[in-house]
Image: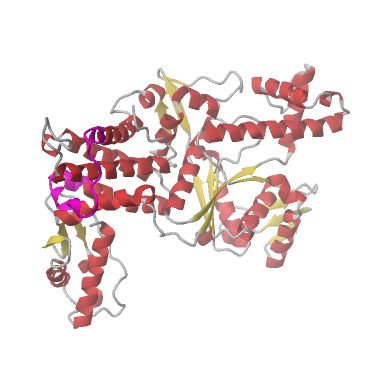
């Protein structure tokens, strides 16, 4: 019996009491009630404060209502007992058979266990990284490469239709600086003012020349355009390759330039004028974002006629909405705090309710230490440490998990030695080793001729040890953890859950009374087989959870 089933049982009891006339609820019976894990041992397996929540509406005393509910709930299938505590809390104990059935349910669900339909029908766009295609992805992008991907995964698991999107900043003066830097390197000239430096520019110059012989002999403007296009193509492909290796996947790579080429920007300006949210002043065109809480109005077209990035940003938001996205999530860096107000105001100016359609997340900085010192700069990229170098130095799994297990808004310092050591003190190793242990146990059971029991041969009531109850309750929590991580955009909840569940599993594994395999020449019995189901269920949950973080679940370590 899991929390959702208990919630249904309580709702059934409330409905029965109303039908009998023993309870009056003017607003009707709730469709679900909150079921929680008790904080103190000895207070049952689950608890609910439903009596405290409904007593006032029912015109009765909370404890009296709790007593009424407890009497009926105690007769429900799978409930071993109900105790009324304090002013009206209900502490519920589940019988071993109902609790043990959780293991079979997990195994039957397999890779779909933990998924739900809580966000079914929602189309959500998650935009993250969105770097300029003028250089390698670096440490500053790495946190979002992990969190954006993981947020997309938990949202999908909750039933949402998710699109992970990379907004390519391929328009603007930086693209000319990029091209000029490549040309200067190819011709052996000094780096131009505002140009890009680093060995990667020299590499690009060689690659561009090899891909397009004679390109550097073209007339200046023709050469700049050709080098810009070819350099962009090569650098973007390298960013895409680095992210795939890092296990971060995008569904859409959206070009900023396309918004201008297909007329989306002027169409956006025309719409804003119709809505009455733009004005002219000083020869420039402005959006009146202060009407919606921004600290100042924003320029759309400068007095010299140049379009601003904000004009592109607005057209891009409206493009997302036109593509049918109900909600747009933006993941921005620590230096983008000022964007929160302007993006919300932008959505409001476009006629939307930002609270319904927009979510702006600001991440904090990450430092990587090795031997107590900040990781040295890249030789190829000049002033940055690249994502590829980090993945090579630390490992994809260790880096992803270590970044995923903390809230996005917390500054983070990671030590290379700590997050790569093969020790239970290292969370990623701890969880992955827990998964590998379940695989080894299943393999050992197979060697002894054991297999999963079928049908009535599985007796869930045999999983009656206190630690088995704890582990089963932990496994039953997984769907709620995933749903919460999706709703709050907090994948670190999955990581912390995996660590807690692995801890319970290890305690069970180390307890002599909970041995899964038969000893010596004794044959495997129903209890051994029941525990094999429990191990299979644990493997399923740990594997599914690691997958939500984009981290591998090794079978051997």
Q: Nearer the viewer, residue 287 or 461?
A: 461
Instruction: Please indicate whether residue 549 sits to the left or right of residue 36 in the image.
Output: right
Quarter assignment of residue 54: bottom left
Q: Nearer the viewer, residue 57 or 28?
A: 28
Which residue shows up at 64% across the image and 60% down it?
Answer: 322
**Quarter of the figure that contains the N terminus:** bottom left
Instruction: Please indicate whether residue 554 sits to the left or right of residue 127 in the image.
Output: left
Asked if 238 appears above or below 185 in the picture, the reply is below
Q: Position of residue 436 (x, y in %)?
A: 31, 32
Which residue shows up at 23% across the image and 66% down it?
Answer: 9
Q: Is residue 149 visible?
A: yes
Quarter assignment of residue 294: bottom right
Q: Position of residue 110 (x, y in %)?
A: 35, 48
Q: What segment carries the magenta color?
A: 444-471
Among all residues in the image, which is located at the extreme bottom?
21
Q: Position of residue 39 (x, y in %)?
A: 19, 50
**Quarter of the figure that contains the C terminus:** top left
Instruction: Please indicate whether residue 29 sits to the left or right of residue 213 in the image.
Output: left
Q: Is residue 59 visible?
A: no
Q: Position of residue 372 (x, y in %)?
A: 40, 19
Asked if 184 appears above or below 322 in the picture, the reply is above
Asked if 63 appears above or below 386 in the picture, the reply is below
Instruction: Please indicate whether residue 429 sits to the left or right of residue 230 in the image.
Output: left
Which residue shows up at 31% across the image and 78% down it?
Answer: 27
Q: Nearer the viewer, residue 401 or 475?
A: 475
Was residue 445 drawn as part of the magenta stretch in this picture? yes
């Amino acid at each position: 019996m899991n929390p959702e089933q208990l919630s249904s049982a309580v709702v059934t009891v409330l409905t029965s009491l109303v039908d009998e006339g023993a309870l009056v609820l003017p607003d009707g019976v709730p469709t679900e009630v909150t079921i929680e894990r008790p904080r103190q041992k000895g207070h049952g397996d689950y608890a609910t404060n439903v009596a405290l929540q409904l007593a006032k509406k029912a015109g009765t005393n909370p404890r009296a209502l709790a007593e009424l509910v407890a009497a009926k709930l105690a007769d429900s299938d799978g409930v071993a007992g109900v105790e009324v505590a304090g002013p009206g809390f209900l502490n519920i104990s589940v019988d071993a058979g109902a609790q043990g059935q959780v293991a079979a349910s997990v195994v039957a669900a397999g890779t779909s266990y933990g998924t739900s339909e809580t966000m079914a029908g929602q189309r959500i766009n998650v935009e993250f990284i969105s770097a300029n295609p003028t250089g390698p992805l670096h440490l500053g992008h790495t946190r979002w490469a992990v969190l954006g991907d993981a947020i997309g995964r938990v949202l999908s698991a909750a039933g949402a239709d998710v699109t992970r999107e990379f907004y390519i900043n391929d328009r603007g003066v930086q693209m000319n600086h990029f091209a000029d830097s490549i040309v200067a390197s190819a011709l052996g000239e000094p780096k131009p003012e505002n140009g890009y430096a680093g060995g990667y520019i020299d590499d690009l110059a060689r690659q561009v020349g090899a891909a397009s012989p004679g390109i550097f002999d073209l007339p200046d403007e023709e050469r700049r355009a050709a080098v810009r296009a070819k350099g962009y193509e090569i650098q973007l492909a390298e960013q895409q390759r680095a992210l795939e290796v890092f296990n971060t996947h995008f569904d859409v790579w959206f070009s900023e330039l396309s918004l201008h080429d297909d007329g989306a920007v002027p169409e956006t300006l025309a719409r804003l004028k119709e809505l009455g949210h733009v004005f002219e002043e000083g020869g420039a065109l402005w959006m009146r974002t202060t009407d919606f809480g921004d600290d100042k109005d924003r320029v759309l077209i400068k007095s010299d006629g140049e379009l601003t990035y904000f004009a592109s940003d607005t057209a891009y938001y409206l493009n997302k909405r036109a593509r049918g996205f109900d909600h747009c999530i933006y993941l921005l860096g620590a230096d983008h705090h000022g964007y929160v107000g302007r993006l919300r105001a932008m959505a409001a100016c476009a006629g939307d309710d930002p609270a319904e359609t927009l979510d702006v997340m600001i991440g904090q900085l990450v430092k990587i230490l090795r031997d107590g010192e900040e990781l040295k700069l890249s030789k190829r990229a000049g002033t940055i440490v690249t994502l590829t170098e980090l993945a090579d130095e630390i490992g994809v799994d260790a880096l992803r998990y270590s970044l995923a297990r903390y809230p996005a808004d917390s500054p983070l310092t990671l030590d290379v030695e700590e997050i790569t050591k093969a020790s239970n003190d290292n969370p990623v190793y701890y969880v992955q080793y827990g998964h590998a242990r379940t695989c080894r146990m299943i393999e050992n059971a197979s060697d002894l001729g054991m297999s999963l029991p079928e049908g009535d041969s599985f007796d869930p009531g045999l999983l009656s040890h206190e630690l088995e109850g704890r582990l089963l309750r932990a496994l039953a929590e997984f769907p709620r953890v995933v749903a919460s991580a999706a709703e709050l955009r907090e994948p670190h909840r999955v990581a912390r859950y995996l660590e807690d569940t692995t801890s319970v599993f290890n305690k069970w594994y180390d307890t002599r009374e909970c041995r899964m395999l038969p000893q010596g020449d004794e044959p495997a019995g129903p209890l051994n087989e029941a525990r094999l189901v429990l191990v299979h269920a644990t493997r399923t949950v740990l594997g599914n959870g690691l997958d939500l973080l984009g981290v591998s679940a090794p079978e051997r370590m």
